[in-house]
Image (cartoon, helix red, strand yellow):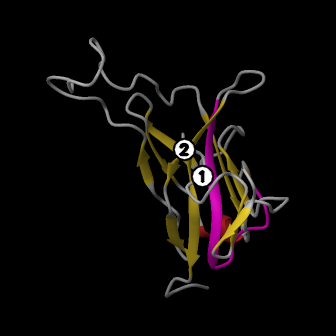
């Protein structure tokens, strides 16, 4: 597919919706609080009778977050060479992505404002940080195999706004 502009954004992936197996989720936070959002991937499966269009014997999603790491990459645009912020839960000691329930695929972020802005360091985080503005991000789940199996979970806009009590 030919690269093109949509608004002020340059796309090379076929359109503004991004990768079809990745959920388009726009995220917003302010620069004076901890970024703390929770996500659940796929429902927990149907209760009672399954829908009639499901194959016989189907019980719902069977994948888990057990043994998986998470890589969140935030850039000013898709073609930017280096990320402005990268959070990698696969780095020993990184506490920025917390798995709450591996079987029901529930997790949350716990990223201090100083880490988002680049004024504070944290294990598993690289990049100069973010100022208020609109960015693009992707969230990749990967395992410990060699090479790792990388599965796109989410992508979209990442918006940082000025908080009222911003330093």
Mark 2 crowdedness (10 Å alpha carbons): few <14, some 14-19, many ≥20? some
Residue sitting at x 75%, y 59%: 3
Indicate whether residue 11 is drawn in magenta: no
Please tell me whether residue 96 is drawn above or below residue 159 in the rendered image. above
Look at the magenta stretch and give its main secondary structure. Answer: strand
Residue 99, position in %: x, y? 49, 39
Q: Quadrant of the C terminus?
A: bottom right
Q: Quarter of the image holding residue 76?
A: bottom right
Please tell me whether residue 37 is drawn above or below residue 162 in the rendered image. above
**Callout 2–callout 1 Cβ contact below 8 Å:** yes
Residues in magenta, as a range? 126-142
Residue occupied by mark 2: 22
Residue 44, position in %: x, y? 31, 32
Residue 119, position in %: x, y? 73, 71
Please tell me whether residue 24 is drawn above or below residue 100 in the rendered image. below
Residue occupied by mark 1: 18
Mark number, residue 32: none
Q: Mark 2 to mark 1: distance in Å?
A: 8 Å
Residue sitting at x 63%, y 75%: 7
């Amino acid at each position: 597919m030919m690269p093109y502009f949509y608004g002020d954004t340059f796309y090379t992936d076929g359109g503004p919706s991004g990768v079809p197996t990745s959920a388009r989720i726009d995220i917003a936070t302010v620069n004076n609080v901890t970024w703390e959002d929770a996500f659940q991937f796929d429902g927990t499966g149907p209760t009672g009778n399954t829908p009639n269009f499901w194959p016989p014997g189907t019980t719902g999603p069977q994948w888990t977050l057990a043994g998986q790491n998470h890589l969140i990459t935030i850039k000013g645009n898709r073609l930017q060479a280096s990320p402005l912020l990268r959070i990698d839960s696969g780095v020993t000691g990184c506490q920025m992505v917390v798995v709450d329930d591996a079987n029901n695929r529930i997790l949350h972020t716990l990223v201090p404002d100083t880490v988002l802005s680049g004024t504070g360091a944290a294990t598993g985080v690289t990049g100069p940080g973010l100022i208020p503005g609109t960015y693009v991000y992707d969230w990749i789940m990967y395992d410990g195999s060699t090479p790792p199996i990388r599965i796109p979970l989410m992508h979209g806009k990442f918006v940082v706004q000025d908080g009222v009590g911003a330093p």
